[in-house]
DNA sequence: ATAAAGAGAGAACGATCGTTCTTTCTCAGA
DNA sequence: TCTGAGAAAGAACGATCGTTCTCTCTTTAT
């Protein structure tokens, strides 16, 4: 019911078709996702892809280009699935549920290791570097997609709802990997249903506001990790 | 109001006091958290810690021991803050709020890069390896802490509530780093308050609908950042 | 048919990886 | 006082890092 155009989250030039290139990208995607990026060397990838070094550097001028192509591929996959969910949905609210099911279904796939973009972000800290830019571009794309769908569904505050949706997705993805996938799925589905309730009951939005919480707690030393 | 014992998430032997060791650990914690683990070499750490290689290997038989000591330190810090929150809270429900404030306050600290354990998990895939075991031990500890606190607060489904609490924390931590911290904080605080409502308004059955959320004060300026 | 491009095979670059080593100096405990 | 541990200093190990190179096929387009 919505049309979606492919979106480029990187500055990579259009790739030529090539069996060797496809093997490289497929191998890199599998290994990068399963084991991380910085701990995997080029030798390992060209070895498992059965490709020579020269061929690798003909298609990817540097390892960074391969990483970006990997992220672009994951994004394209995500994009295709979201488009399919929207095409199959009978209305925008249904689309949000289907997209959610897509997400929670992944938690149970063998080899699931969380979100490829979140994982990549943990390995590259420069917020202006090409990898982080790709991560943030993907996330902005997803947020906008969800926000537009909430808006189409008639949600009174689509931006707010989208932020919560994205945050719940982040939590379900992480907790589904490092914890119990079933509980993550249940919690996510429940929360999405709560968000969608405002579409059917739009008049009830002025419930008593919750007390504002004081952020400066009595705890002293602030340190850096969460 | 609760006493908490320190907990070992690694198998490291007790460490001796040493200025050089402390400098190494402090430096490693800073760099590992800011830039990742696998992409940082030992030379870099001993250089910034102003320590020689021999001294490093006297205190840490291998780089992996340094990584584990780093995770243990983050856990100890987390543990101390949770204990302080519980000590300062007037009741278990209040403790959950204070712990939550601790979490959301971190999103605004300069240099915040998400959860150190989630980041570490993305770089080490072996679920039986010592690093992943430390990550999972820390998460199990936190989940149990939250569950016990929910139970003490009289929540009808403490395990379910704890799973949601942890998942919301994961989402807020990630979304607060890769997105807008303000929206992440608001969404987290609101959701925690929703979870705590079951203490005052006991649940009906085993599939309790969540109370309505308040939307009015949610859209405070900043939108999803990139 | 001819030229251009893609791919295979493998040597080699300097740099850095994690780790081990020897040597010297300092300082606190016995 | 003697002893032994901690720390500084730095050379060196083999391995791997990302990258560049030459040289020889095979495929494809003109």
Image (spheres, coloured by chain):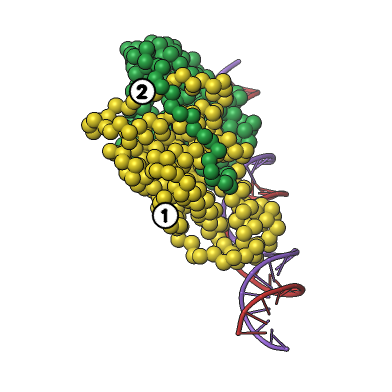
Chain colours: A green, B yellow, C red, D purple
Q: Secondary structure at mark 1?
A: loop
Q: Residue at x 53, y 54 (%)?
A: B73
Left or right of residue B224: residue A91: left
Can you tell which mark lies on residue A95?
none
Label 2 belongs to which residue?
B212
Q: In which quadrant will I find the C terminus of chain B?
A: top right
Q: Residue at x 40, y 43 (%)?
A: B91
Give the image location of residue A191, x and y in percent. 36, 27
Q: Nearer the viewer, residue A10 or B44?
A: B44
Give the image location of residue A204, x and y in percent. 37, 15
Q: Is residue A60 visible?
A: no
| Residue sitting at the far front | B90
- B100 vs A162: above or below: below
Lower sequence index among marks 1 and 2: 1
Q: CA distance from mark 1 to mark 2?
A: 35 Å
Give the image location of residue A43, x and y in percent. 55, 45
Count of numbered badges drawn on the protein:
2
Label 1 belongs to which residue?
B3
Q: Nearer the viewer, residue A118 or A54?
A: A118
Quadrant for residue B93, please give it.
top left
**Which chain is home to disc 1?**
B
């Amino acid at each position: 019911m919505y049309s979606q155009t492919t979106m480029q989250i990187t500055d990579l030039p259009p790739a030529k078709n090539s069996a060797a290139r496809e093997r490289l990208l497929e191998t890199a995607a599998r290994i990068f996702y399963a084991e991380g990026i910085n701990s995997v060397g080029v030798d390992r990838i060209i070895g498992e892809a059965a490709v020579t070094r020269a061929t690798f550097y003909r298609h990817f001028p540097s390892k960074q280009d391969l990483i970006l192509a990997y992220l672009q591929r994951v994004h394209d996959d995500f994009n295709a699935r979201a488009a399919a969910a929207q095409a199959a949905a009978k209305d925008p609210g249904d689309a949000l549920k289907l997209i959610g099911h897509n997400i929670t279904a992944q938690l149970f796939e063998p080899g699931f290791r969380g979100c490829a973009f979140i994982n990549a972000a943990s390995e590259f800290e420069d917020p202006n570097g090409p990898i982080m830019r790709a991560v943030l571009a993907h996330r902005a794309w997803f947020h906008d997609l969800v926000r537009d769908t909430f808006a189409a569904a008639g949600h009174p505050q689509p931006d707010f709802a989208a932020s919560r949706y994205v945050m719940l997705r982040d939590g379900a993805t992480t907790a589904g990997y490092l914890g119990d996938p079933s509980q993550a799925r249940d919690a996510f589905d429940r929360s999405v249903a709560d968000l969608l309730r405002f579409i059917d009951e739009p008049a009830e939005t002025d419930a008593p506001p919750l007390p504002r919480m004081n952020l400066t707690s009595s705890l002293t030393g602030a340190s850096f990790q969460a």
